[in-house]
Amino acid sequence: MAWDYATLPPAKATRAPLSSRIPLIPVRVSIAIVGAGIAGLSAAWELARAGRRDFVLLEASPRAGGVIATESHDGFVFEAGPDSFLTSKPAGATLCRELGLEAEMIPTLPNPGGARIWHRGRFHPLPAGWQMLAPTRLRPLLASGVSTGLLRPGVKLGLAARWWRTPPPPPGEESVAQYLRRRFGRVAGQALADTIAGPLLAGVYGGNCEQLSAAGFLAASAPRPPAAHARPPGASLFTSLQGGMGSLIEALVAHLPPGALRLASPVAGLRPAPGGGYRLELASGEALEAAAVIVATPAWAAAQLLGPLDPALAEPLAAIPYASSVNVNLAYAAAPALPAGHGFLASRGQGVRLLACTFAHQKFAHRAPPGGAVLRVFYGGELAQAPEAEVAALAQAELRQLLGLATSPLRLAVRRCSRAMAQVTVGHQARLAALAAAAARHPRLRLAGNAYQGIGVPDCIATGRAAAAGLP
């Protein structure tokens, strides 16, 4: 079974499209939101929570939620997109509490082992103290893979030799891999990029550490709240919902004013309205006029929509690259013997094509019936567009190869996320600066989504709410 935007079932509380009842003359609203992913829904919630009823939320597909969707079958929970949100960024938890979902929030299961990396035919624990881009503790690096060779002895010597040295400043903006080579030397830095940083960034963000901007990525991934809101010691790194992340979408849709959400309503054009504000032309031939507009689509879609309005605004949007991915959920009646922890990442050049695998039933409760298991395998590159049967067969073959899992799954589902993950590549900060300068000319036009402050769920929620806050 393949999942895609057009084939996923609508959220339970989604209202039917109203296009058949909208007159062909322009309808005037105060605010139009384009895109009902988590950013657009969060913008709508911010307006609704402030008592606003004079807005419309337009979504091109037949369902709300964008890449966030959950499917349940016989006690098995399949996530189509993100399975959780970072606890250290409070926007996700805050929204869940406001929607009455606090009792549904669940931490990761206390499964020892942490993340593991498949390298040279073995699973290696991720060295303690690693913070996505670089290590923060030397001792775990020196102790890692003592007998199995995650890092070769020469690499460890190079790390130890440069650990307390202050590296020269970069000549300009640099990639994550360039930063590691500058910080730890060519050999040791490249080993860290290939063995640890590369798999992490590919598996979590769909990115290439030779292209991702070190400074830009740090800016986009850093927690934004005051120190008082930082993750308490011992708290779970990730938080999810008992029924899956789709519960968040259902709750947001259920709290919208009647008639506010219009599905299957793609916006074909956006231009200034004769009386001020903006005129939105729908693909159906209808037209809406709004005093303000929030564009909560991927940056590439926003560029297409805003190009005729302001080419200088569209140019930096179009320059933000996006990555595609495909994942396979596999359900098993009897949980196989698996390594400890919540899953693993795979280094490149290790004889497999998967980027990562999550043991969903070992990561969160309520993901499988008693004794059962759900595994989720991720691919990128050209496999993101490969036929679903090919991807499903490859996932099962590689699970046999890596885990010895010969049992056929009870059920599986393939889910494509096409051009869904914004990439913070070298030059991203300059693109954002150009975007801010151009956007300043349009005070009633705001942007939200995963291209601006980070690609995580809390980042998207924060941009949506900020876009809606203060609109007249």
Image (tube, rainbow, N blue to C red):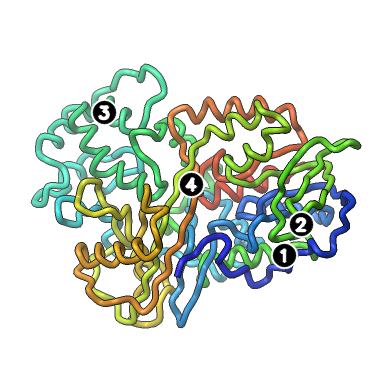
Classify the position of the N terminus by image quarter: bottom left
In the foreground, 371 or 158: 371
Quadrant (top left, top right, bottom left, bottom right) of the C terminus: top right
**Circles 1 and 3: CB atoms closer than 8 Å:** no
Q: Which residue is mark 4?
A: 421
Q: Which residue is mark 3?
A: 181
Residue 86: give its label. none
Distance, label 2 to label 1, CA atoms, is 8 Å
The residue where tag 2 is placed is: 48
Few, some or many residues within 10 Å of mark 1 (<14, 14–19, 20+): some
- Residue lying at 24% horizontally and 40% vertically, measured from the top left: 194
Sequence order check, earlier mark of 1 and 3: 3
Q: Secondary structure at mark 2?
A: helix
The structure residue drawn at horizontal position 32% and vertical position 52%, both measured from the top left corner, is 355
User: What amino acid type should be assigned to the residue bearing mark 1?
Assistant: His
Is residue 107 toward the left or the right of residue 408 in the image?
A: right
Q: CA distance from mark 4 to mark 1?
A: 27 Å
